[in-house]
Image (spheres, rainbow, N blue to C red):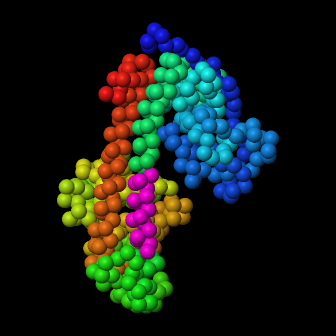
Amino acid sequence: MPSNWKTSSLKDLSVDVSYGYTESASAERIGPKFLRITDIQNGTVDWQSVPYCPIGPKDHAKYKLARNDIVVARTGNSTGENYLFDGNEDTVYASYLIRFRINPDLADPMFVWYSMRSPKWWGFIKSSKTGSAQAGANAQVLGHYPISLPSISYQRKVSQLLSSIDKKIANNRAQAETLESIARALFKSWFVDFDPVRAKMEGRQPEGMDEETAALFPDRLVESELGLIPEGWEVNSLKDVFVRHKVQNKYTKKSVCAEGGTIVFDQSESMLLGYTDDAPEFNSTPDNPFFYFGDHTCVMRLSTSPFSLGPNAIPLTGKNLPSIWVYHACRDKQNFQEYKRHWAELIIKPVCVPSLSLAKKYAEITTKLYVRIRNVENQNVTLGNLRDTLLPQLLAGKLRLDQAVE
């Protein structure tokens, strides 16, 4: 540490250290947002998934988070996980979180928070956990965390540099989510709501579609076990649109390597995965994506190398259909809460299957979206590695800021 830096504890830098509010969370908008341990993942929060809670005016004022408050998980495997509140939501925090409100005259709150994202912090947490069944750390223990401090102005410059990287990562993540939502919306329009077919039935040109693509849709709806579906389309169960592949050591604890355009369903965690070994030629082979379908989240990724499968994973490939189409058909039928227990409940669901030429056209369009998603995800990996490399060096004064930005 440079000689002109000082060391202070987290507690001494705080004007308030408080435990959170005890209440049951609710999906209904019956009060402010209710931030819990489980809502904080790698220093970020998905505010759309954060629930609410009932709370009286007095407690609301007491437990309401203010901009730059730092909340820290104090129990279980999440002990030490933390979040710097940005102040954009009316939020109170739950009882298994501890709030540290930093005195801005003593330290830049963001600089303190970045110190609490560093290897030094996680080492401190590991050595501070107490208890065997439900390990944790209380406010007094966490408050002893030592933080090396340069001048306030230098702290802010470091915070600005690191936060600029995190903002770019967040923007990239939002862009990827938007691209994924476009692919989902297109699937719903074409293969669930049958918007192009309905337009042709009314004598209209399908919106935003060229004549060649429009010609792939029929102009009539006919009765089926699913109700009205486009003429010439079939009703199958999901198990009829993919091929299941055997994994030799499926029942061992060792991972295996999946090759080829594969979708994978994990029985234990309700996941769909997949892989492509054909990335340079990807635009000409849109039926080989790398899928990842997780519990409460749905992300498609494209990969240029094999990936490991756990013992519960079941590899699948599209059966005479592009895997991207099959993936979205599975996702459309997936209700995360309903199908958590076993994949068999999902694969018997009926699905309306279009012509192969139309499924390929959908894959051709959406492949371009997922190539862009892959690009921003790869950029995020690079940015994350850069941030994680700079973070401990800058916070320890081993790297000057002018060196970091050269």
- Judged left or right of residue 62, residue 221 is left
Can you give x and y, in whole percent of width and height, for residue 82 in the image?
55, 35
Q: Quadrant of residue 28?
A: bottom right
Can you give x and y, in whole percent of width and height, for residue 373 in the image?
35, 54
The residue drawn where x is 30% and y is 57% is: 371
In magenta, the rendered stretch is 174-189
The residue drawn where x is 36% and y is 23% is: 402
State yes or no: residue 179 in magenta. Answer: yes
Work out whether residue 222 or residue 66 is closer to the camera in this orientation and state it.
66
Work out whether residue 135 or residue 247 is closer to the camera in this orientation and state it.
135
- Judged left or right of residue 237, residue 92 is right
State yes or no: residue 49 in magenta. Answer: no
Work out whether residue 53 or residue 127 is closer to the camera in this orientation and state it.
53
- The reply to whether residue 265 is in sight is yes
The residue drawn where x is 44% and y is 62% is: 181
Q: Name the quadrant of the N terminus.
A: top left
Work out whether residue 294 or residue 285 is closer to the camera in this orientation and state it.
285
Can you give x and y, in whole percent of width and height, for residue 124 in the image?
51, 23
Could you tell me what secondary structure mostly forms the magenta stretch?
helix
